[in-house]
Amino acid sequence: MEQNVDKGSKSYLFSIVMVAVLGGLLFGYDTAVISGAEKGLQAFFMGADDYTHSDLYHGLTSSSALIGCIIGSAISGLFASNLGRKRTLMIAGMLFFVSAYGSMEPETLFFERGVPTYDLLVMFNIYRVIGGIGVGLASAVCPMYIGEISPYKIRGMLVSWNQFAIIFGQLVVYFVNFMILGDHEMPEIVSIGQGVNAVLPHSDQWTITTGWRYMFGSEMIPAALFTILICFVPESPRYLVSVGKFDDAQHVLSRINGMRQAHVILEEIKETMHTKTEKLFTYGWMCIFVGIMLSVFQQAVGINAVLYYAPRIYDAMGFDNEMTVTIFTGIVNIIFTLVAIFTVERLGRRPLLIVGSIGMAIGAFGVAVSFGQPGMEEVCMANLLIYSACFMFSWGPICWVLIAEVFPNTIRGAAVAIAVAFQWVFNFIVSSSFVPMFNLHLTEGDHFGHWFTYGLYGIICILAAVFVWKLVPETKGKTLEDMTALWLHHLMGDYPEMVGAVFVPAEQTPAETPFMKLDDVMAAIAEKYPKVQNTHDELTALGRVLKSRNYEHKTSEDGSFYKIALKKS
């Protein structure tokens, strides 16, 4: 692999990113595999003699992996900060593999194969939770790792490839499920009242006993590939700096950015990481709030209702070939994810999010109005595709881009973990509430649930656009180290107010502009801004902001004094 001394090796960078995005592919694969397997799985456990497999049990089973996702994302910061990004992804890969095998053969060691029981249902869900923990870890650490290893000028594009991999993984599993199903048919399940169902006698028994097993087991192949390949990628240079491995960090940065630029980047990373971690609210509550709400809105707009239940939705619309239409939806999703990848660095994060939110609202309201109307099946499907496509070029990839880059270095691990945990909590809420809302009826046979559900999603999309417009900062063209300065700026407000306490006019002669003691500067900042901790990291970050806002700063040679001066306009 050739490496340019000044520019680094693009092939090396892209090979690392391609391995990392396999974690995103597994994320998509694991969460969407249930869409093709859930009917066969439901019919299998409905054959149990020791309990009744009601809609409640099936709903919990279909979404049990999300419980693991919440756990995995919640502990991802702890793992990423203490074990490193690379080893955390290796653990995620192993969890994916164990879950895939266990979900295919939940009877292993403890139960008779092919005999559904309540205990077997519990064991199946344990395996799904294990896979969910892997998804939770990968969903937080993959974009974090890609963001930390990528040059800032193309960081948004490279992190967006993670979302492409998620959607591609979903499309792959749609195809795999379709191929496994082959000439077989999904079991026919009818309601007999009070949340209890029955399998019609002529239903395809192979789908009930075997088909769903192959669907879950197919994940073992990409899981094994990911686990092996992740062993050969380097650790994140930001993590290496945080544990004092400066030479290793320099080596990785040199191969990616070139030797000259690597030295500059390494010094910038050191500036913002004098301590390994800082308190979560060091940079104020708004920083954490924005990250959390990005996650909340990404899920609250309701997209996973389409991704997880697409066959059921298209069946309710009146389509006979729901699996084929689901695959077509996956292809549309892929195309519009590519739109984000190739425009995010040119258009920025905020414009894509705002336009996507408005487009999603239009599509969701269109579905609400047309669902169930005679002769409007194609119109309803078109509106659903508009809704889905607008998500794919906006909230799908851009949310992950922002979560990976918006937090300061010293709190990124913990902050990303919290944000992604909220994402999975709301994923669970949306996924588990969709079917009950979708099936709401004011009178027998009406479509109130369909109208209400997508009308609600449309309103949330509008709120999401307002949130981005008012509160989300633009991060295009900024380094990860600039995030420290950005949030410190937000916390401290308008710097010129501090002129009397901290700044010295630049027009004075050098003799009249003595250095101020560092302690005096810190005390002045602490007095005026008590929420700001007295750390040298924050003064360094402050200096970076001042420099970008037409100020200048420097320290004395021995580092014991500090001067910040206003420049002439």
Image (cartoon, rainbow, N blue to C red):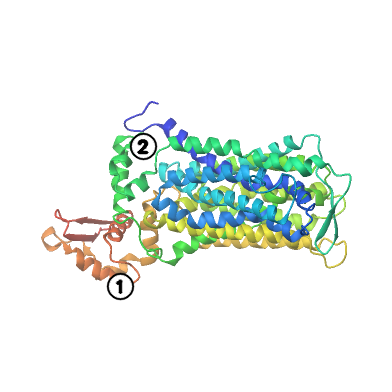
Examine the image and state in which quarter residue 320 appears. Answer: top right
Q: Amino acid at mark 2?
A: Asn
The residue to which callout 2 is attached is 257
- Farthest residue in the top direction? 2
Seen in the picture, residue 128 relative to 206 is either above or below; the reply is below
User: Could you say whether the residue bearing mark 2 is in a helix, strand or loop?
Assistant: helix
Image point (28%, 60%), residue name: 539
Q: Nearer the viewer, residue 12 or 555?
A: 12
| Cα gap from disc 1 to disc 2, whole angstroms | 40 Å
User: Could you say whether the residue bearing mark 1 is in a helix, strand or loop?
Assistant: helix
Q: Position of residue 283 (x, y in %)?
A: 38, 63
Q: Is residue 20 visible?
A: yes
Q: Nearer the viewer, residue 506 or 184?
A: 184
Q: Nearer the viewer, residue 217 or 285?
A: 217
Specify the quadrant that holds the N terminus: top left
Examine the image and state in which quarter residue 266 appears. Answer: top left
- Marks 1 and 2, the one that precedes in the sequence: 2
Horizontally, is 308 left or right of 417 in the view?
A: right
Cβ atoms at labels 1 and 2 below 8 Å apart: no
Horizontally, is 121 left or right of 151 in the view?
A: right
Q: Give the label, 1 or 2, closer to the camera.
A: 2
Residue 528 marker: 1
